[in-house]
Image: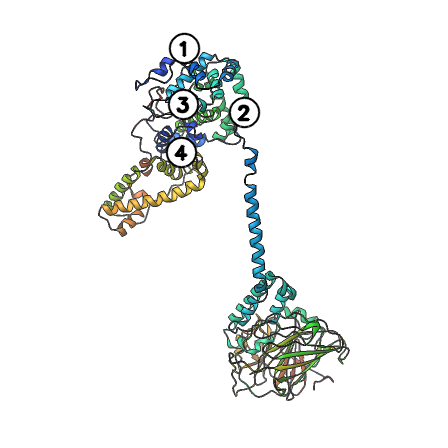
Amino acid sequence: MDSEAPQSAGLNLSAASSRSDGRKPGLTSIPELESFTRTSGLSIDDFWQEADGLGLAKAELAQALLTIGARYNYGLPPGVEAGRAQIAAFWRSLQLRELALAQACALGREKAWRQLLERYREPLTQAAIGITGSASLGQDLADSLYAEMFGLPGRDGERRSPLASYAGRGSLMGFLRATLAQRHVDQHRRTHRETTLDGKDFAAESTAPSLPPEVLVRLGTALTATLSSLESEDRFILSAWFLDQRPLREIAGVLRVHEATVSRKIKRLTERLRKQLVNRLRAAGMSRHAAEEALGADPRDLTINLRSLLQTPPPAAFYRQGALPEPEQA
Amino acid sequence: MTESIHPRLHPEPEVLSAFAEGFLPEHERLECLAHVSECSRCRQIVFIAQPSEAATVPAPGAITAVPRLWRRFALLPAMGAAALALTVLTIATVIYRQPTAAVAPLAQTARSTPAPYVSPRAAEQAAQNSGAKAVSKAPGAASKVAVAVKQQRSVAIDSGSNPVAAAPNADTSAASANLDAQSRAVPPMSQGASLLPRPAPLQQSPPAARTDGIAPNPELPAKGRELKAAKKSDSTGFADTGDNGGPVRSRNFGDVTFNIEHQQSQVSSLSAVKGAVTDRAGSAIQGATVTIQQLAGGTMGTTATNANGEFTIEAVPPGKYELQVTSPGFQRSSGQFELQPQDLARVTSSLSVGSASQTVEVAGASAVVPTAAVTAEVSSNKARLLPSKLPVSLTVSSGNRALAVDSAGTLFFSRNGGKHWKAIKPPWPGKVTQLIGPAGSTLFRLTTDAGSVWTTQDGLHWRSEPVSANTAH
């Protein structure tokens, strides 16, 4: 099962409005939405008609919009009251047509499914092949996702489809790709948790004289403190570059910056980390020479796990908004 | 290491895809980034889910940002201005560099501290590569020539570390490996230049500092027409050529004048070179070494002037030659000329005394006649180490076989490129005064002070040849 619980096909306003913070959503009913669209200049009449062509009733789509707006607080941080301008801007930023298609598919509308398959089957299969690196595995992955997206009845008999979680903030193809990637990663991590060691080339044990234990302890402490103080973006760059060994292009693509920017950041970041480590070691009573020498220690001599240091569990859960479904643990 | 799966909550694919596509609001992006930076699973999903061109599907009816037409060409004016500026800069650079590149580099090169002599053949090759016209017209070619000269100079400097290589003997650069194949096809020189007894004994002197440049090839002279050959100035590397092959006015040093007379040589199909060497005052210079070398790297002949300052080199195959005249205490002088069959080149060389900046050692030792054969096979450094411990007077080589004559006129032979020398027991009376490299069917040819000519096929066994009627003088 995927890590996120599929949304109910029938988005109801009550669920959307039952926020954990008790704050009143901006819009709570379809009449309010219709009134808002008329008064705010949102010309979505064509959109209503297009949704109707997919078999999606106006009320169903309006309810989905209200739910999404409430879920994400119209793009504003939690606790911030959304004004009419923010609400209008939020809805304008949505991929309304793709949202309508996804909602219609999640509700099992045949017209929407035909259109979805017609538009996304081939690119989704290609994306799956690209993710898995195999034509057969990619085809299997894509087929399994089709079946899942079509919706499986839950315990309560209600149809559940991952497409219902699509909020229209990104492209539908991006959502499908991310869903594919999530399925593939989870499958891979389940099946490759124990891998054979045959053919693996392990590094030889360090023959160099190890540093004194007290120095290693100080170094480990300094490393822990330094890496713990990293900003999220710095931590992401370090993890993606050193742990995942992702190319600069991919890191830059995620951060929406140029590759050269990432390269410069990596360089500056490592220099800064080195300085911080030296300063921390000197603060711990070591001379500069000893601190520099300690930085040349073999990482295998350290008792700390650099990977786990960088991958420290976040102090708080990602989801803070009460409207989010409760994901299951990976 | 086994990745620990994050026990906390993971973002939905919708959030991750929006994060990857950059659609998340800032506060949510930071939250997602914080999670992704610590969660390898979600980081992996984000990276995998990054859109690829092949899988990108534009939504039908979706508004795609099409750049306006004027924006497509917005950079055209800037690009045009940049191209124009680059063109102007290039033209300005060419205009600025042209006069200096054509003259100044070479002049500066030549006027720099006196450098060891550069092989004339190498200089000629550089001249052939670039062309004399290009030197004056194309700055790039001139630069190349300058570079070539510099390279040659550097080689000469390297070899100049040994005294012999730096000595004037090296001027008469002669047979190299190329000499063998090329000169063997050339008819042998007859009993060449008659040589007078050695001049006053002079110690091997340091080179008259020169950096030979490249002189333009002189025009082929008409019969009887006097041609002042393009003279190589020892300081500038270039000779001022007069209009229409007129007299050449020397810049600094001695002058060489060629007077080519056709159908004058008495040896069939071969030519001859006769001349006289004087100083600026017109006094004959005895013992001056006159060397001719084919510009194509072939036949070489070396002789010395007699008491009247005259010399003769006969049986010279047709071709382009460079003549060099050296004498201890005088500036080296050289010029190029071209011989047709049965030509007689009359050479008049007027040498200037060495300048103050040049070191000319005059010692009362045995005579030193400039030699050739600064080759890879026979280095002057090795030739210096003759068993007689006397200075080298003449050297010539063919492949690894080499001959050397010391200042006493004793002949030495080496079969390993000059590493080891063996004295040849002379079947001839007197001293060896001239050595000629491979020519025709003979490997080496020598002339004694008695005028007898001897040839050999291997350097060890010598056979006397009848004296030609065309003996000099």
Task: Give the mark toward the camera: 3 or 4.
Answer: 3
Name above or below for residue B288 compared with residue B128. below
Q: Which residue has dot 3 on it? A: A85
Q: Nearer the viewer, mark 2 or mark 3?
A: 3
Q: Marks 3 and 1: in contact by CB < 8 Å?
A: no
**Residue B361: image x %, image y %?**
51, 83
CB under 8 Å between discs 4 and 1:
no
Amino acid at the residue labelled 3: Ala
Residue at image position (54%, 17%) is A114
In the image, residue A8 lies at what x, y percent? 40, 15
Q: Residue at x 44, y 42 (%)?
A: A260
Q: Name the residue at the top extreme.
A: A157
| Residues indicated by labels 1 and 2 sit on the same polypeptide chain | yes
The chain holding disc 1 is A
Q: Earlier in the sequence, mark 1 or mark 2?
A: 2
Q: Nearer the viewer, mark 4 or mark 2?
A: 2
**Rendered location of residue A308, percent (x, y):** 32, 35
Q: CA distance from mark 4 to mark 1?
A: 42 Å
Q: Which residue is mark 2?
A: A122
Q: CA distance from mark 1 to mark 2?
A: 31 Å
Q: Which mark is residue A196?
A: 4
Q: Nearer the viewer, residue A33 or B381?
A: A33
Q: Mark 2 falls within which chain?
A: A
Decide: is A292 above or below A184.
below
Classify residue A250 by image quadrant: top left
Q: How is the image coloured?
A: rainbow
The disc placed on residue A157 is 1
Which of the two discs, 4 and 1, sits closer to the camera?
1
Q: Are marks 2 and 3 in contact (CB under 8 Å)?
A: no
Which amino acid, by three-letter code, is at mark 4?
Thr
